Amino acid sequence: MKSDNKQPFEINSNNYSFLEFIANKGKPMVLSTGLSNLSEIDKAVRTIEKTGNQQLVILHCVAIYPPEDKQVNLRNINTLSRLYPYPIGFSDHSLGTSIPLASVACGACLVEKHFTLDKEMFGWDHKVSANEDEMLILATESKRIFQAMGSSRIQQVENDDRIESFRRSIVAARKINEGEVFQEDMLDFKRPGRGLPPDALQFVLGKPTKRDLEYDELLEISDF
């Protein structure tokens, strides 16, 4: 496979002398793990590292065309990510776009997918290759999935207006006359969230209302 300064070499993991030869070129490398066990993968990574080349992407790969869904083992992407300090991708030979898109959700930073102009063409890999429509789906939807993965930190992203619109407040479930003691069946929780929040109900119950309240009217602190 030819390479220039912008294109990485892609190499299978058990050709150690060739791995060393290419690694010494100082170019980015994509290491496919198809056909390999963990010991062979580890030896391949160490062979590359010994040259001082750490420009490496490791691809989880099942070299079956196509594999059964249960053979794909996308969780291996996470396993490789825990084992090695390099970006992990996925070399896909499945039918369609579902599995390579799922690999992005599993953390794949790079997806290799065969491309064909005609799935009926002669050759062993055309049927597992993506056509133009599928490649467009893979390219566009993988970006959406990557963006949607976002951060692992739980944080509120909705603005105050959205929060107020969707949250609920304590309201009168019927007309309530001044002096009536608030009971649970006299109150309800409805949008928007501009009034007292539902968890304030404990402070309202048993208190007499200080004014007349109409049906659906928001309760205020000054009302009890």
Image (tube, rainbow, N blue to C red):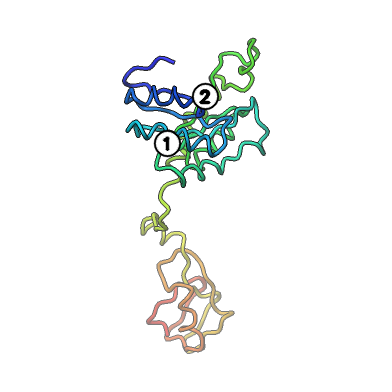
Furthest toward the top, the residue is 122
- The reply to whether the C-beta atoms of the residues labelled 2 and 1 are less than 8 Å apart is no
Q: Secondary structure at mark 2?
A: helix
Q: Position of residue 130 (x, y in %)?
A: 57, 22
Q: Amino acid at mark 2?
A: Met
| Residue topped by disc 1 | 46
| Residue topped by disc 2 | 135
Please report the residue visible at 65 percent of the width from the left and 27 percent of the height from the top.
66
- Looking at the rendered image, the disc whose residue lies closer to the viewer, 2 or 1, is 1
Q: Amino acid at mark 1?
A: Arg
Residue 57 relative to residue 35: left or right: left
| Distance (Cα) linking label 2 and label 1 | 34 Å
Q: Residues within 10 Å of mark 1 (few under 14, many from 20)?
A: some
Please report the residue visible at 43 percent of the width from the left and 25 percent of the height from the top.
19
Q: Work out whether 94 lies above or below 118.
A: below
Q: Secondary structure at mark 1?
A: helix
Instruction: Residue 17: name its quadrant.
Output: top left
Q: Work out whether 100 lies above or below 1.
A: below
Q: Nearer the viewer, residue 39 or 158?
A: 39
Q: Quadrant of the C terminus?
A: bottom left
Q: Which numbered disc covers residue 116?
A: none
Q: Position of residue 64 (x, y in %)?
A: 64, 27
Q: Nearer the viewer, residue 57 or 184?
A: 57
Q: Residues within 10 Å of mark 2 (few under 14, many from 20)?
A: some
Q: Quadrant of the N terminus?
A: top left
Q: Nearer the viewer, residue 27 or 71?
A: 27
Q: Nearer the viewer, residue 46 or 224?
A: 46
Q: Position of residue 121 (x, y in %)?
A: 63, 11
Question: Which circle's residue, 2 or 1, is located before the other in the chain?
Answer: 1
Instruction: Residue 63: name its quadrant.
Output: top right
Q: Position of residue 143 (x, y in %)?
A: 44, 35
